[in-house]
Image: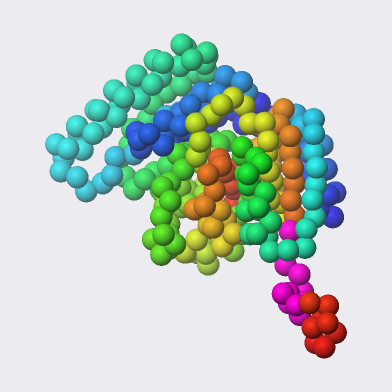
Amino acid sequence: MGNISHILLATDLTDRSERAFERATQLCRDARAERLTLLHVVAVGLPPILTDQQLNGAQTFLAGKIAQLPSLGVATPAHASVRTGHPFSTIIGEGIAVKADLILVGAPGKVPYAQTLVGTTAERVIRFGECPVLLVNQPPRGPYARVLVAFDGSDGAIRSLEAALAIAPDAEFRFVHAWWPPRASFGEGENSKRII
Amino acid sequence: MISATVQHVVAASQTAPPRISIDLVENNPYVVVSNALRWPDLLVMGTHSKGRFASTTSVGQLALLLLNESTRDILMSRP
């Protein structure tokens, strides 16, 4: 599978994370990832009894998910990890600890721009994480077939491209490199440009 | 230069994709990418974060807009 052998799936146990789980199983099955880690983070600050309930419940839930993997055609060794902490920093720390090559998360809900100033967990994992992050918006319908790469030649774009080549080796790749036109000509007709 | 970089990265990968096309467009990058989003099932991009502490509010303007608006899967990585 190219240079992606260990996938870390960060799940909040919601429906959107279920899509990410389905994508993770597809990547493990079709691209032969060597390890899969399922991670759930229980938020800090809860009463101890609730924390214990959530830890135990999440552990049971994730164990059930791992038990499903063989029936889904996945032979990749998998294990569950349930932690307490701040979600984004715990996800990043787990990614470093297990040497993950790719972190999968369910895409965050769409929120007004003002609410994104602090950033969603997914956004902060991208910003501070050590490896590429795949946000899963749609239920998978097989391997990726059409990949659009917004490419500017930056180090981040190259890292993302390398990961994409590993997870979608049979896809059609379309690269787009766009840049702003010179300010003097933006939105102006030919006559206006001559006046300027 | 962009084409050469793409070719270099693809050639270095262990699994080169069978079909590649490269479009160079002089226009607002957000408009260009948004208009192309009906086609793919995966959007790939880097972030333009200017360092871990300088960019404390977002991962980058274009990346943030697409994160919030795209209904496609998105693969992103910071520099």
Identify the residue at horizontal 75%, vertical 46% (top origin).
Answer: A175
Magenta highlight range: A178-188
Left or right, A17 with respect to A2, comes to left
Query: On the image, which quarter does residue A181 sit in?
Result: bottom right
Quadrant placement of the N terminus of chain B: bottom right
Q: Is residue A182 magenta?
A: yes
In the rendered image, the vertical position of residue A139 relative to residue A68, given as above or below: below
Place of residue A29 in the rendered image (x, y in percent of width and height, measured from the top left): 57, 19
Identify the residue at horizontal 31%, vertical 45% (top origin).
Answer: A85
Query: On the image, which quarter does residue A101 sit in?
Result: top right
Identify the residue at horizontal 41%, vertical 30% (top origin).
Answer: A18
Place of residue A177 in the rendered image (x, y in percent of width and height, measured from the top left): 75, 55
Place of residue A14 in the rendered image (x, y in percent of width and height, measured from the top left): 35, 35
In the rendered image, the vertical position of residue B52 relative to residue B18, given as above or below: below
Q: Give the color scheme: rainbow, by chain, secondary structure or one colour.
A: rainbow
Q: Which residue is more in the foreground, B7 or B31?
A: B31
Left or right, A147 with respect to A101, comes to right
Q: Residue furthest bottom?
A: A195
Q: Is residue A96 visible?
A: no
In the rendered image, the vertical position of residue B61 relative to residue A44, given as above or below: below
